[in-house]
Amino acid sequence: MGRIRAVFEDFGGQVLFAGETLAWAVRPPFRLELLLHQAAAIGVGSTFIVAVTGLFSGMVLALQGNYAMRQFGAEGYVGGFVAISLVRELGPVFTALMVTGRSGSAITTELGTMRVTEQIDAMESMAVNPVHYLVVPRVVAATLMMPILSVVFSAMGYLGGYLIGVYVSLIPPGPYLDHTKSMLDVPDMTHGLSKAVMFGAVVSLIATYRGYSASGGARGVGDATTQAVVWSSVAILVVDYLLTFISIG
């Protein structure tokens, strides 16, 4: 019972922290310089790993799609299959997982170190709200950058799928591109982008909360970072299911 109670208390603390972050996000002063710095750290810093992951994910999708559709003589539909899979599902989810591993862990470690070394307490003593100064720029930056990174992932994935489909599986480029146009619609794109926005908010809130509430010295910071990555990954998959169920159901 004690462990179950601790889980609910932890979840409640996360919800209250998210509410406090939202409340401070709409209050001045708006620190644009901090926002841009975090956007560069999260967005630009994650571009390479997101692009490489997207490229090879698209290649694997094209190989698997060609293998499945070749049995029905429908190889030309591989392009549409790759595009829809990337835009609606794999792009947002894989991007969020990559950003969690790279930037989410870094955010938790940074804030956790500031907590255990009493830097956050020092900010409070100087009448500077730590949530407003430290948390809000990171959450807003992640929420804004995640859709952009998802687009990068999907674009590189489609490029990888095209290279494999056309030059390895020898699918004619005309049908490959034509079926992509006919199968991929604007609602598919907006669905994927809305997922990416939600993932950015969820990942950044979990990462900042774990770092902000860390305790116990260096070991506590390590535990907080591990929890942030694990719970962010689980939350991504849960939110992904809920959003997909809502959109399809």
Image (cartoon, rainbow, N blue to C red):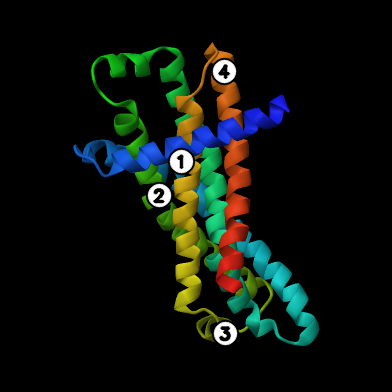
| 204 shown above or below 68 | above
Measured in 3D between alpha carbons, the distance from the residue under mark 4 to the one under mark 2, in whole angstroms, is: 27 Å
Q: Earlier in the sequence, mark 1 or mark 3?
A: 3
- Residue at image location 45% in from the left, 69% down from the top: 190
The residue wearing badge 4 is 220
Q: Residue at x 58, y 82 (%)?
A: 176
Query: Considering the numbered disc 2 on the image, is that residue within a helix, a strand or a loop?
Result: helix
Query: Vertically, is 198 above or below 3?
Result: below
Tag 1 and tag 2, C-beta contact below 8 Å:
yes
Amino acid type for the residue under numbered disc 3: His
Q: Quadrant of residue 16?
A: top left
Residue hosting label 3: 179
Mark 1 crowd level (few <14, some 14–19, many ≥20, 10 Å Cα): many
Q: Position of residue 134 (x, y in %)?
A: 34, 30
Q: CA distance from mark 3 to mark 4?
A: 52 Å
Quarter that holds the C terminus:
bottom right
Instruction: Return the mark for residue 204.
Output: 1
